[in-house]
Amino acid sequence: MTKTVNNSLPEIRNRIDAIDTQILSLLKERLRCAREIGRVKAQDQRPTWDPKRERMIFERLEAANGGEFPWPSLMVIYREIITTCRLSQNKVEVAYMGPESTFSHLAGIKCFGQSAEYRATETIEDVFIEVEKGRVQYGIVPVENSIEGAVTSTLDAFVNHRVRVCGEVNLPISHNLINKSGSIKDVKQVLSHPQPLAQCRQWLRKNLPEVPTRSTFSTAVASQMAADDETVAAIASELAVKTYGLQVVVRGVEDYSGNTTRFLLLGAESPPPSGADKTSLLISFLDRPGALSESLSILARRGINLTRIESRPVKGTAGQYLFFIDMLGHWEDNEVRQGCEQLKEFCSYFEWLGSYPVGA
């Protein structure tokens, strides 16, 4: 039995080598096709990113796969392939709140793959500024967490900066306790951004009741400090482990499963309809009785499904509020456009923030 396995092993490896050579040849051919598409789009002045086409590719691949190859892994592989081919047409720079290995960085990688160029900024508002000034093509910012709620600094930045929402990414958040040694005995202090600390509060209280915690500007800053001090542990992502040469002490220290953060992709313009889209608005209602309920009734009568409504006070004006509204559908859909035109009659301020593909 052992002899048969040993004899067949070189044959199997030769087959794998042949398959790898064939895959590489096909990838190079795909890249050449993508560059040709880029030249055609440039002549027609069409955008390089076509979300409807990408959605069709993934749907076709999932159907053709039939569940044999693990779909999440296959999706990651093809995301890299598609992004690399698209970037061969036009290099993309993406701004995110850094430093490297934050969850915003991870969300950018999920959206654009490893091939894009990533530019870390100090704050969320800096991401808006980079996009607004045209210094990068895209920015990625967190807008809400399934446990902690809205990211108010992102909502407030929409008031002061003119950018378009052109995509969304839903990133499952799993927190890890990490340090240099990988031993929980060495942990004398736990550092992280305030949100991860809040999301892991019960675990920390139960498992490290005597160990103090301290807030840092980001999970990446906490990871850097853990790399410099053996007594410090950070709560951070898997990417931080690789980036800062740390080890995982305990995986999944978040208090609740299903923790997800929604990120918005910012750009100069929104993409065309993909067939499964959202539209985001920023509005303020007229100061009259029933304005809010009448406005929502307009959308309901047209069968428009609201997925989110969030209020923020207008700074410096007591009793005045802005509302962030997400609805299913694209601005170019007749029902959405006509519904929004009617909605304007009840608004003292109305801004279309963008329409974009629904995140997976």
Image (cartoon, rainbow, N blue to C red):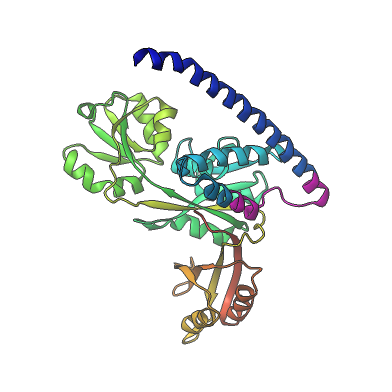
Magenta span: helix, strand or loop, mainly? Answer: helix
Horizontal relation, residue 146 to residue 44: left or right: left
Q: Of 322 and 340, which appears nearest the observer?
A: 340
Q: Is residue 206 visible?
A: yes
So how many labels did they put on this image? 0
Q: Which residues are magenta?
A: 40-57
Horizontal relation, residue 162 to residue 212: left or right: right
Compared to 30, does 54 lie above or below?
A: below
Residue occupying image coordinates x 47% and y 74%: 320
Spot occupied by residue 226 in the image (x, y as percentages of width and height): 34, 29
Spot occupied by residue 323 in the image (x, y as percentages of width and height): 49, 70
Is 325 magenta? The answer is: no
Spot occupied by residue 338 in the image (x, y as percentages of width and height): 63, 78
Residue occupying image coordinates x 45% and y 17%: 9
Spot occupied by residue 355 in the image (x, y as percentages of width and height): 60, 62
Residue 283 quadrant: bottom right
For this orientation, the residue located farthest to the bottom is 289
Residue occupying image coordinates x 61% and y 76%: 335
Is 45 magenta? The answer is: yes
Compared to 42, does 299 lie above or below?
A: below
